[in-house]
Amino acid sequence: MQIAVPTSREQLWALLAEAAEIEHHLMCCYLYAAFSLKQSSEESLSDSEMEAVNRWRREIVAVSVEEMGHLTIVCNILSSLGAPAHFVHQNFPIAPGYHPAGIVVKLAPFDRQTLAHFIYLERPDGTDIADGDGFEPPRRYSRSLDMNRLMTVCTDYETVGELYRSVAAGLKHLSVLMGESTLFVGDPEHQLDEDVAQLPGLKTVRCLETALSAIDSIVRQGEGADSESVDSHYQRFLRMGYEYDALLQERADFCPARAGAINPVMRPPLTQEDRLWIREEPAAALLDLGNALYNHCLRCVALAYGDVGRPTQTALVAAGIELMHLLGSVATKLSSLPANASATGVTAGLSFATVRSAAAMIGEAGSIEVLIERMHEISIRCEKLASAYPDLQTMLRATGAATDHLAKRLAGHAERCRREEEAMRDSAQVGVVAEAVAPQPAPPQPLIQRDGAKIIRGSAVDLVYDGPRCIHARHCVLELPAVFKANTPGEWIHPEAATAEALITVAHMCPSGAIGYRRRDGGQEEMAPAVNLVQLRENGPLGIRAQLILDGIPVGMRAVLCRCGASANKPFCDGSHNAIHFQASGEPDTVASQPLAQRGGPLNIDPETDGPLLVSGSVEICSGTGRTINRTTTTRLCRCGGSGNKPFCDGTHRANGFRS
């Protein structure tokens, strides 16, 4: 089949919008299948079968994440061409004619035919394989029209790889016709890149070369990849199919998934064909909650494409990632609940329904207040549902608490941005260069005795000992043995045995922040360092020196955070790296970077659920010997222990089953 070539910017926008929706639809289909998989061997699975199912779940979710990466790449190309990011999509089930006849997408629980359908959708061009039973197109039709029209038209394509060939041909044609500088008019600062979104292969699109490279990364990773590419989605699903067949050979009634609904919908449908109304409670209420989380994730990521600035862009994408994690637990629970009294034995599932305003927020930082408002609404609804359905109480209250915490974290970010903008305006008014402003001391922390922490009163200085954060660096017991009497029964810290200056000196030497202080003599409290540092310890944790805000909570100026993945006190280190013989260089290669305009200030570290540490704020990452590895304002640091690019995250946490 001859590929269609867009003849105008408008036609190219339309083709990319379809590509975005294809990627989005595939992502939803894969996630739906993953959420339907059984969760324990108590659901009629042997231990070996459960091991395979857990591995498949991780693999399908990993492919789904890569589909999200493809969607984001397409949005980057759209943005580079002057169009908005496209995160809305047609709700399931997809009407015939919306995609070509051979592109059938519907939400279905995981079974051998669903897997065969995934293989068919991801097949390389020219591969002769059959689609899964039950996924036949309802009718044959042709959408092809002459693309040399003023209004956008639809075109047919056999595979998704063919669709991307049309996009690439259009980019080349219009670059010659219009000139690259005229075609690529979007602001690159509005796009997402790998540092912000942590999605494989995500690059900023600035010209024809970078656009074609972005498309090539999609094709190589999934749709249209060479049939011999072992890491393509096609090959990964094929291997899953071979293993599925082997398990069926061992037990003919092997069933890895729950009996989920096909194309669940939230409201009574006009026709009952190929869809099921989720009307049983609490499934209907949980479906409403799940779709609210899903839509809010889309809003956060869509807003990140606006004129919001790099720190806010990072915070918005991080919020979207956290909402997707919350969505996973809700959707998995939903798949275990009865769907409709008229469908005996069928369980519910997430419908991924979007609303017309899903991506219609004003692209500026002030819209964050609207996002926060919605998060509080979701949190309140979780509490109401928890009271109404005691069996779901634990999951719902955890979801509500996490959403509320996320709202507060985002609100804290917005407030910090506001203060920084005011400070910059004030500095400009008086002609003061920001770099010349002396670092100001951080406000004293309140004397709050959190779990495991003790406040030991002294005449001039109160010592604060937070035992769970201690990594036994032993500066305290070696420098002031009269104050810190190790292995002594009862009270072992005696601040009256040393001067205020000596106590403060040894507190500053404590790398973990387990020892802090509050002055009672009117002296200077601990100041924020002039330069924020993350220092790597050979085969060990991350040492932090900064005015540190950890998961939205100020925790002082010093901390030691786990990067082996084994700590029982995450995100803090508890010494587990020694027990597991963790291997990680303290002297990785230097990354090319430029000096930072500001080297201090608050440093935000937000642990992503089952993922890396998201660092935002000026920071210098140093080796154990003090060599600068990187200088940045945004990065993600590995804490699963598996990254091949330590200390930076490379996405391995999605494959190795890391849980935080």
Image: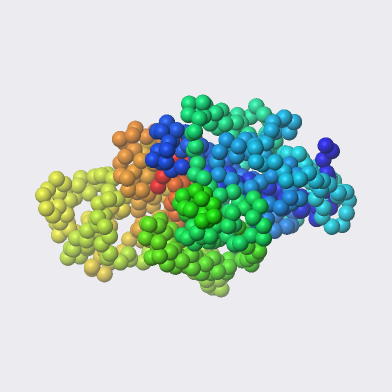
Whole-percent x and y of residue 364? 61, 66
Does 235 sit left or right of 469 as displayed?
Answer: right
Q: Would you say residue 289 is visible in this rendering?
A: no
Does 567 sit left or right of 245 as displayed?
Answer: left
Residue at 43% in and 64% down: 385
Residue at 47% in and 60% down: 281
Quarter of the image with the N terminus is top right
Whole-percent x and y of residue 306? 64, 61
Toward which corner of the image does residue 308 lie, by quadrant? bottom right
Residue at 55% in and 28% down: 245
Whole-percent x and y of residue 138? 73, 46
Q: Who is closer to the viewer here, 590 or 148? A: 148
Q: Who is closer to the viewer here, 254 or 160? A: 254
Toward which corner of the image does residue 583 lie, by quadrant? top left
Q: Who is closer to the viewer here, 442 or 29? A: 29
Q: Is the residue 144 above or below the residue 444 in the image?
A: above
Q: Would you say residue 572 is visible in this rendering?
A: yes
Total labels drawn: 0
Q: Who is closer to the viewer here, 493 or 271? A: 271
Q: Is the residue 215 above or below the residue 619 in the image?
A: above
Q: Is the residue 147 above or below the residue 311 in the image?
A: above
The residue sitting at the left extreme is 489
Does 157 sit left or right of 204 as displayed?
Answer: right
Whole-percent x and y of residue 390? 37, 60
Toward which corner of the image does residue 162 lie, by quadrant? top right
Residue at 45% in and 33% down: 49
